[in-house]
Amino acid sequence: MQGVIPQTPREALTFLPRRNKNMCQFVLFSLALHVVMTKGTSVSDRQVDLGHICQSMWNAAGDNLKIGKEIVINKGSSKKHPLITVTELGKKKMQKRIYVKFKALLNSYEADESKAGKPSKQEAFIDAVSVKGGPMEIAFKYIKDLGKILFQNLDQFKPILKKMWFDKCSKKGRGPNISGFKHTFVGEVRYDGPKKTKIVEGFHNWIHFVAEEMARKLSYFPPPRKFVHGPPALISANFDWRGAKKPNGSSFFIGTSPAFEMALYTACFFRSSPAFEMAFYDGCPLRSPECTCQINKERLRIIATNCSGCVGTAYPKL
């Protein structure tokens, strides 16, 4: 990805021309030396703090739904009510451009791994996310200040956003068959051979959860495994989706704008890469480094894995 500074030996080989062997050897030697020097890092070093930018991105979103007023959460054990109910005020707010583009993109996907979203809808969504003064611009400036990218403005960064979120990445030996966006915001259904059953992976978004539950394609099993009122509100829930179970439930924000989530996960993706002490399998870390930060009174833990330069998964950890 032109304009992105390589951070690992794998990335160095990706970014540098194949014919420049001497330069490749120098970069690999320098990075290998850095690995040796950082080998003594502690477990706590697997956590990196995003600092004040989380609150800044939250404030800049402006279109997060307010819990209790624009969105209601069913924390009880009854199945009579859905987990999440969007009120009339909330529905009005969800007519904003960012929600419209996000839902259009979701609708272009299927649970089947072989089917991907339409490129035109991907680009329209990236444009809606990348607005002046919005959460993604704050994330961009943060990443640039870290020295992770060389781009001068957010428009130049948009092709990288599209590549890292929508390119299909190789994961767990299953081949390059799914993008980080689809895994995170849509979810995937695959067959687990050893268990001889279909399972759900990913699916960390409340908007998609509401849509699939309303369409009777998702069955929620109350009560929530965990719940944080916030704001921001977070939940871990058990459910079946399209005839498959989600092992150990799924955690996700509730009421958050897609612009906020994309910016938060993108900032974490760059901030937590590289994790020099991590072991990798098929391009993905075996153990994901965490990003931490505080929004209002809530201390958050965020996962955003880097699989060979693309997002593997992203979600709030509960």
Image (cartoon, helix red, strand yellow):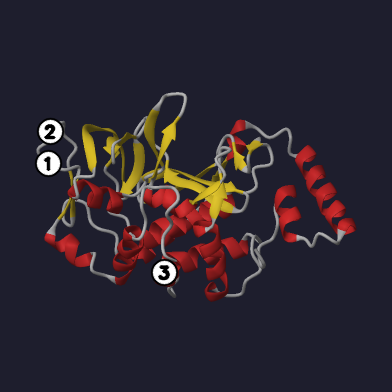
Badge 3 amino acid: Gly
Alpha-carbon span between mark 3 and mark 1: 34 Å
Q: Quadrant of residue 147?
A: bottom right
| Residue for point 42% across, 71% down | 120
Look at the image and tell me in which quarter the C terminus lies.
Answer: top left
| Residue for point 67% across, 67% down | 2
Q: Is residue 8 visible?
A: no
Pointers 1 and 2 in contact (C-beta within 8 Å): yes
Q: Is residue 43 above or below residue 209?
A: above
- Frontmost of labels 2 and 3 is 2
Left/right of residue 235 with respect to residue 55 in the rendered view: left
Left/right of residue 24 with respect to residue 72 in the rendered view: right
Residue topped by disc 2:
78
Residue topped by disc 3:
134
| Residue for point 37% across, 33% down | 198
Residue topped by disc 1:
81
Q: Is residue 110 above or below residue 136?
A: above
Of label 2 and label 3, which has the lower sequence position? 2
Quick one: 110 or 128, which is closer to the camera? 110
Task: Tell me the element at label 2.
Answer: loop
Badge 1 amino acid: His
